[in-house]
Amino acid sequence: MRRWIRIFAVFCIGFGLTGRPVQAASSLSHFDYTIQYKNKTYHKTAYVYLPDTDEKLPVLYLMHGSTGDAGSLAKQMQPLLDRWIKQGRIPPMAVVFPTYYPSRDFVQDDYSEDYPLNRFFARRELKKVIRKTESNFNVYSDREHRAFGGYSMGGVTTWEVIIHHADWFSEYLPMAGDCWSKNGTADVIQGVQKAGLQAEDLHIQAMVGENDGTKQDMIPQIDALRADDSGLFNEENLEYWENNDGSHSFASMRAELRHALPKIFTAKEEV
């Protein structure tokens, strides 16, 4: 997995989309907050995509990969989200782009050093991001209208969210990233059990490119989760999908989101 994550890092900063521009029917906003990490205060920013509607919205929290940043990913995704919503491919939704880096000083070439930051974000920081989102924007505040996903090291973060806060979201989109927790699948199962959830209570779409080496780590974990005696995971609530000819790249991430987003926040009643 590690060699392929390094390749993806090239795409995380300054990747420009080509082709004809889509007329924006949306806005990018942001909010600021502070965290305490290792006895030091950091000022952080999360970016928020909002479609052109006055309706209350469900929320997808989408995490970047190694060396990436929230602002760049938000700008890359805005025209795609605009297009997919306009086409009726996906329902209108807010998308929050946070970062797991306390500051850009933490960015380094050895992405394996990011894992403590992924884990800290999932365990400690995510709650603050959710509260700031739900207090500042016209969005739902229940798990049925929340989803969390991420690519590469953002996919690693997604598994950490399932482990520590499975009951906060009903939909999960781990892309090109496996679970790095000490006990692997056992920690995922324990996290879901601790949250008091049943198989019907969550939906995971695990995705990766056909030529992405990270799938060699993802597949055994998915198979192990489905085969576990707990009965919490099966082929319906833990889907696995490969995009044809996909590598470890932004183009692959785009294809995976295009596949997955039409399946979330559908036919959910207001609560």
Image: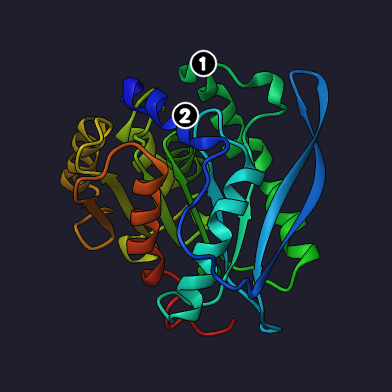
Res. 168 visible in picture: no
> Which amino acid type is marked by label 2?
Ala
Q: Where is residue 183 in the image (x, y as percent from the top left)?
A: 35, 26
Above-or-below relation of 25 to 118: below
Q: How far apart are marks 2 and 1 (CA)?
A: 9 Å
Q: Position of residue 17 (x, y in %)?
A: 49, 51
* Residue for badge 2: 9
22 left or right of 3? Answer: right
Q: At 52% from the left edge and 66% from the top edge, which residue is drawn? A: 81
Near-viewer residue (82 or 36): 82
> Which amino acid type is marked by label 1?
Asp
Q: At 32% from the left edge and 34% from the top edge, which residue is drawn? A: 186
The quadrant of the image that shows the N terminus is: top left
Mark 1 lies on a secondary structure that is loop
Above-or-below relation of 140 to 186: below
Task: Kindly check if marks 2 and 1 are in contact, taking CB atoms under 8 A apart as contact.
Answer: yes
64 left or right of 198? Answer: right
Residue 175 numbered tag? none
Q: Position of residue 227 (x, y in %)?
A: 15, 45
Near-viewer residue (239 or 213): 213
Q: At 24% from the left edge and 30% from the top edge, which residue is drawn? A: 213
Res. 132 visible in picture: yes
Bin the neighbour count of mark 2 within 10 Å (Cα to Cα): few under 14, some 14-19, many 20 and up: many
Q: Which badge, 2 or 1, comes first in the chain's sequence?
A: 2
Near-viewer residue (209 or 236): 209
Mark 2 lies on a secondary structure that is helix
* Residue for badge 1: 109
Which of the 4 image quadrants contains residue 156? top left
Which of the 4 image quadrants contains residue 52? bottom right
